[in-house]
Image (spheres, rainbow, N blue to C red):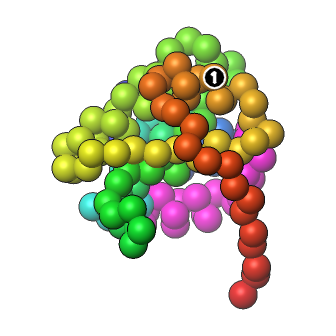
Amino acid sequence: MRPAEIGDAAEIARLSAQLGYPAPLDAFEARLRKLLQSSQHAVFVAEAGEGRLGGFIAVEHRLIIEYGERAEIAALVVDAETRRGGVGRTLVAAAERWAAETGLHDIVVRSNAVRAESHPFYESQGYGRTKTQHVYRKPL
């Protein structure tokens, strides 16, 4: 496990596509470049060997008017070939360390209702469900 580098963009794009978030490589490079320059964000990767990543996690420092400051796991993807091997636990631990080192006392994660297999994983890591919500989107 290590902090992400701009050269990881292609592998992050490959992994994101596994969960249904495909985008051109240049989009991932641009996004990753911005995240790596921000003190409010961190991205960690798990190396799987031979230039491949076993997974990645993105975490951010959020300030929400009704809750205050907290960390939020914005993305966690473990390669389908390496799931259930401890990569997810290692990445979550890295995000939690980053949050604690940043001075944050809470961390949250949102998990899509259709990803039922991820819910027990988060619960096994000590996360408790606090609410269920609908997400609405409007293109501008």
Few, some or many residues within 10 Å of mark 1 (<14, 14–19, 20+): few
Q: For the magenta stretch, what is the residue range?
A: 18-34
Q: Quadrant of residue 118?
A: top right
Tell me: residue 86, above or below residue 80: above
Q: Which residue is mark 1?
A: 120
The question of residue 25 being in magenta is answered with: yes
Q: x, y (%) of residue 71? A: 37, 51
Q: Amino acid at mark 1?
A: Pro
Q: Residue at x 64, y 42 (%)?
A: 111
Q: x, y (%) of residue 54? A: 55, 26
Tell me: residue 114, above or below residue 135: above
State the predominant SS element of the stretch in magenta.
helix
Q: Quadrant of residue 69?
A: bottom left
Q: Residue at x 75, y 30 (%)?
A: 116
In what quadrant of the picture does the N terminus appear?
A: top left
Q: Secondary structure beneath disc 1?
A: helix
Closest to the observer: 18 or 71? 71
The question of residue 49 being in magenta is answered with: no
In the picture provided, is 48 more to the left or to the right than 27? left
